Image (cartoon, coloured by chain):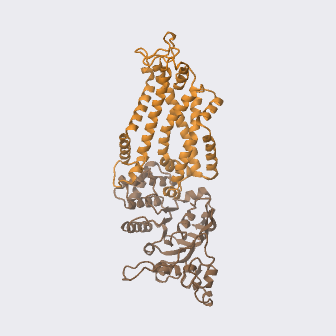
């Protein structure tokens, strides 16, 4: 194992979360393993519906029960399994030890409370401060996240701020209690490009200053390259590749990761013709293929890929990949069989 | 009430700074003031409230004082609205009656709304069997015609003004519970509820600080409109002899008493009827205006 257990602040093992709908069970997260080291950043990449957000909600146990349920697995935070905690214990952890930034800054603030009140509230949930002290602290937090004239802004309502400003307020709220782990669920997706860079920079700077570990969920590989130390690539609820950020970009192993990287438009090359795409589409969550979920879209899939799901196995350079290509089995198999839908 | 206009300004201008509460209130008043019908309604409501408050000062006679020598008199300079079958001054009785009608209307609405809000928000927030239980009870209550339910309650509890308030409030519960439940279901799915949950907030805090303020506006509108129907129900109960007992002046009771003299002295029933009509129209116009002013979609 390339990760030593002592260092990791969060370790997710074999997490399985399902949604039970009228049409049947949807395995939104289906055996996810990763860990985050202290002060480091893990990126979780994948397309919509790959189970990224559900993974983060499962960690905080914020799923809409009873529709969504964690079926099995362990979420070890500082040596303790969060899935075994009581409701009350979880409330004490949320916001205080682990907090979360949501995707949509326009809707993730309460429209009826001022920004200052909302930060102060989060502080007062976990710390015994009087109203005045909490207010002072929230003004301080606004200053910390780079909001000009924080005293004035604290008295304003969310609708009076721009999207970028609101996301800064969200960051202030989530960092108000100095959490050890910050989960950012697509923190920049809803923002425009110039603001995205500012927000990422801010998160990175605060992370360094406060020593917070960061789990960043994104579908933007640029964000990953900029922010992360490790990357977990998810497809259909499973981690298909888990590696150092450098390796993912220089030597991607799973065909899905390769496909993802190929489909990023390159600005420095003059490419004629269409953008590279991954053929096919994500299989229906109600009807996942029995083998590797990516097999129907995979250019090198062989018979075994359609039949049996590979394990997330360590390769020679310490990275983990869920693919038959990197097993001894591969050579014994015949030619690639394409089964495009 | 300040939370609502803000929904409206939300999309308008993010650069608006300064004392936002004042700005939002101002825009709300502006909208309301533009609505002539609402202003008429508000005027009626205010006038009747003032009349009710100052009834002892304004009433020319004691509302229960009988002058049998002057019974069934038509309106004159002495008795502006005439006298009833026992020679009591109708104007004075109407003035004092407004105190009872408005109190019953407002108190029963408050009581019913409060209970309904609590039940509705609990049902909407917790869902599952709590929701099913509360909503099924509401369905049962709604299945009764309002006046029948109120009659049943008053016959069990006994006829008195307090019991009328309880009966009318009771019927208000399911209406409010339904409205609040619906809005709660919408609000609880919003991202900021998830966000505050992720900060470790308890359910009670989420409900009181984050859900209730955001579901209040339909309740305010419904309350205003409900006061009108509460006044009607209360008057109807009194008319049927199940409400406020004579000789206490109450509009419904007055209607009932004048009924036997409709042919000889129509003014005994005419004036209480008109007054009920006027107040109810006032509250309805005002309620409709409030709804328009609070609705972010009705922007001109």
Q: Between residues A207 and B31, which one lies in front from this camera angle?
A: B31
The orange-coloured chain is labelled B
Residue A186 relative to residue B26: left or right: right
Q: Between residues A135 and B270, which one lies in front from this camera angle?
A: B270
Residue B131, x across and y down, in percent: 61, 49
Q: Residue furthest top?
A: B69
Relative to A4, is A22 above or below? above
Q: Is residue A3 visible?
A: no
Residue A308 relative to residue B113: left or right: right
Chain A visual colour = brown
Relative to A71, is B147 above or below? above
Question: What residue appears at the point 42 percent right and 31 percent down from the top-left corner?
Answer: B44
Relative to B279, is A161 above or below? below
Q: How many marks?
A: 0
Residue A277, x across and y down, in percent: 47, 79
Q: Residue furthest front?
A: B263
Question: What residue appears at the point 62 percent right and 31 percent down from the top-left corner?
Answer: B151
Residue A13, x across and y down, in percent: 60, 71
Q: Between residues A315 and A206, which one lies in front from this camera angle?
A: A315
Residue A151 relative to residue B162: left or right: left
């Amino acid at each position: 194992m390339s990760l030593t257990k002592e260092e990791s602040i969060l370790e997710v093992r074999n997490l399985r979360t399902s949604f039970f709908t009228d049409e049947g069970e949807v395995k939104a997260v289906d055996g996810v393993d990763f860990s985050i080291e202290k002060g480091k950043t893990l990126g979780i990449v994948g397309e919509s519906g790959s189970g990224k957000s559900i993974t983060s909600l499962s960690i905080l146990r914020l799923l809409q029960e009873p529709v969504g349920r964690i079926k099995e697995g362990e979420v070890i935070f500082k040596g303790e399994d969060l899935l075994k905690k009581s409701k009350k214990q979880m409330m004490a952890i949320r916001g205080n030890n682990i907090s979360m930034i949501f995707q949509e800054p326009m809707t993730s603030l309460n429209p009826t409370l001022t920004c200052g009140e909302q930060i102060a509230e989060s502080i007062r949930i976990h710390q015994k401060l009087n109203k005045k002290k909490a207010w002072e602290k929230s003004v301080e937090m606004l200053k910390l996240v780079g909001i000009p004239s924080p005293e004035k802004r604290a008295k304003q309502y969310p609708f009076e701020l721009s999207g970028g400003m609101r996301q800064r307020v969200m960051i202030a709220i989530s960092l108000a209690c100095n959490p050890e782990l910050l989960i950012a669920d697509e923190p920049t997706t809803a923002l425009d490009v110039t603001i995205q860079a500012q927000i990422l920079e801010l998160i990175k700077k605060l992370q360094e200053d406060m020593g917070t570990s960061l789990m960043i969920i994104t579908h933007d590989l640029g964000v990953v390259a900029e922010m992360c130390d490790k990357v977990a690539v998810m497809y259909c609820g499973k981690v298909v590749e888990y590696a150092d950020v450098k390796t993912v970009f220089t030597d991607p192993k799973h065909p899905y990761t390769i496909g993802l990287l190929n489909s990023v438009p390159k600005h420095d090359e003059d490419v004629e013709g269409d953008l590279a795409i991954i053929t096919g589409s994500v299989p229906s969550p109600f009807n996942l293929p029995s083998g590797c979920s990516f097999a129907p879209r995979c250019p090198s899939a062989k018979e075994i890929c359609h039949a049996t799901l590979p394990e997330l196995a360590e390769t020679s350079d310490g990275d983990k990949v869920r693919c038959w290509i990197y097993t001894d089995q591969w050579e014994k198999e015949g030619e690639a069989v394409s089964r495009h839908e | 009430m300040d939370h609502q206009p803000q929904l409206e300004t939300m999309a308008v201008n993010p650069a608006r700074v300064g004392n936002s509460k004042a700005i939002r209130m101002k825009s709300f008043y502006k909208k309301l003031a533009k609505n002539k019908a609402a202003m008429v309604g508000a005027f009626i409501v205010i006038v009747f409230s003032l009349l009710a408050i100052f009834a002892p000062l304004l009433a020319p006679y004691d509302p229960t004082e009988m002058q049998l020598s002057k019974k069934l008199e038509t309106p004159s300079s002495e008795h502006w609205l005439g006298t009833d079958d026992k020679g009591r001054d109708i104007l004075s009785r109407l003035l004092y009656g407004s105190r009872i009608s408005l109190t019953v209307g407002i108190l029963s609405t408050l009581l019913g709304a409060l209970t309904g809000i609590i039940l509705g928000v609990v049902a909407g927030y917790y869902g599952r069997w709590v929701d099913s239980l509360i909503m099924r009870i509401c369905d049962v209550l709604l299945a009764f015609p309002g006046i029948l339910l109120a009659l049943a309650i008053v016959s069990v509890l006994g006829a008195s003004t307090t019991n009328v308030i309880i009966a009318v409030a009771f019927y208000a519960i399911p209406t409010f519970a339904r409205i609040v439940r619906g809005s709660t279901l919408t609000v609880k799915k919003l991202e900021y509820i998830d966000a505050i949950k992720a900060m470790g907030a308890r359910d009670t805090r989420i409900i009181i600080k984050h859900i209730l303020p955001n579901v209040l506006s339909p309740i305010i509108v419904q309350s205003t409109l409900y006061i009108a129907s509460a006044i009607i129900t209360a008057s109807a109960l009194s008319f049927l002899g199940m409400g406020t007992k004579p000789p206490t002046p109450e509009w419904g009771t007055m209607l009932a008493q004048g009924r036997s003299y409709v042919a000889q002295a129509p003014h005994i029933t005419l004036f209480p009827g008109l007054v009920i009509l006027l107040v109810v129209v006032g509250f309805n116009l005002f309620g409709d205006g409030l709804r328009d002013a609070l609705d972010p979609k009705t922007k001109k």
